[in-house]
Image (cartoon, helix red, strand yellow):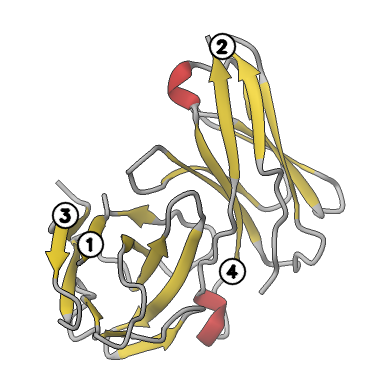
Amino acid sequence: DGGITQSPKYLFRKEGQNVTLSCEQNLNHDAMYWYRQDPGQGLRLIYYSQIVNDFQKGDIAEGYSVSREKKESFPLTVTSAQKNPTAFYLCASSHREGNTEAFFGQGTRLTVV
Amino acid sequence: DAKTTQPNSMESNEEEPVHLPCNHSTISGTDYIHWYRQLPSQGPEYVIHGLTSNVNNRMASLAIAEDRKSSTLILHRATLRDAAVYYCILRALGSGGGSNYKLTFGKGTLLTVNP
């Protein structure tokens, strides 16, 4: 089945460790996005990519890094520089045109202790 | 980025219609109006989108004001499964590259459906 997959669903890490969240899609979408969501809040854009080997910072990129080496994959690394990493992380993908819908993964809940 | 404004919360009764408003006074001529909804602990799902004309699909209807500065998502008969946060966002047509491809969400409207 076509879709977008995030793994793992739950992730626990110790403070000071980097952690990488996976996002894979087989929808042939050029654009991919990473969001962070805190309890009771909306989605805040971390990074987005419109094509392989290119990505741009969103509104809250500090403490995060990404890569886009393949069209299907857009991993997000939460670095030790991110002061409050515990959150719900969502990945999305879409065609680039504005008249197309975006598809979201089921999210990864990261807890840093 | 063109921004949208939505009420923080709304309440409805089961089996009744729900009208969720969205203001987007700075919308540009090529921005599409999209609606998504998010159930607790899940990723958002697409509901509907439109450019100028009103749109209908199996989930909802989208009514777009003639000046395009506001729109309304209409759920014709709310069910308990429609209780979610509803997001109204604008998507640029996609020409020009760069930040035209941003997909920015606000806080949305929390819809509560009473049995």
Q: Residues within 10 Å of mark 3 (few under 14, many from 20)?
A: few
Tell me if label 1 and label 3 are in contact, CB under 8 Å: yes
Q: Quadrant of the C terminus of chain A?
A: bottom left
According to the picture, the residue beneath numbered tag 1 turns out to be A111
Residue visible at 59% across and 69% down in the picture: B93
Horizontal side, residue B50 vs residue A37: left or right:
right
- Front-lying residue, B84 or A53: B84
Name above or below for residue A66 compared with residue B59. below
The chain ID associated with circle 2 is B
- Labels 4, 3: front one: 3
Residue visible at 80% across and 53% down in the picture: B68
- Front-lying residue, B50 or A12: A12
According to the picture, the residue beneath numbered tag 2 turns out to be B14
According to the picture, the residue beneath numbered tag 4 turns out to be B93
Looking at the image, can residue A73 be seen?
yes
**Which amino acid, mark 1?**
Thr
According to the picture, the residue beneath numbered tag 3 turns out to be A10
The chain ID associated with circle 1 is A
Residue B100 in the image, given as x and y percentages of width and height: 56, 78
Horizontal side, residue A98 vs residue A48: left or right:
right
Looking at the image, can residue A7 be seen?
no
Residue A65 in the image, given as x and y percentages of width and height: 29, 86
- Labels 2, 1: front one: 1
Q: Distance from label 4 to label 1 (Cα)?
A: 37 Å
Tell me if label 4 and label 2 are in contact, CB under 8 Å: no
The chain ID associated with circle 4 is B
Residue visible at 82% across and 55% down in the picture: B69
Tell me if label 4 and label 3 are in contact, CB under 8 Å: no
Residue B105 in the image, given as x and y percentages of width and height: 55, 60
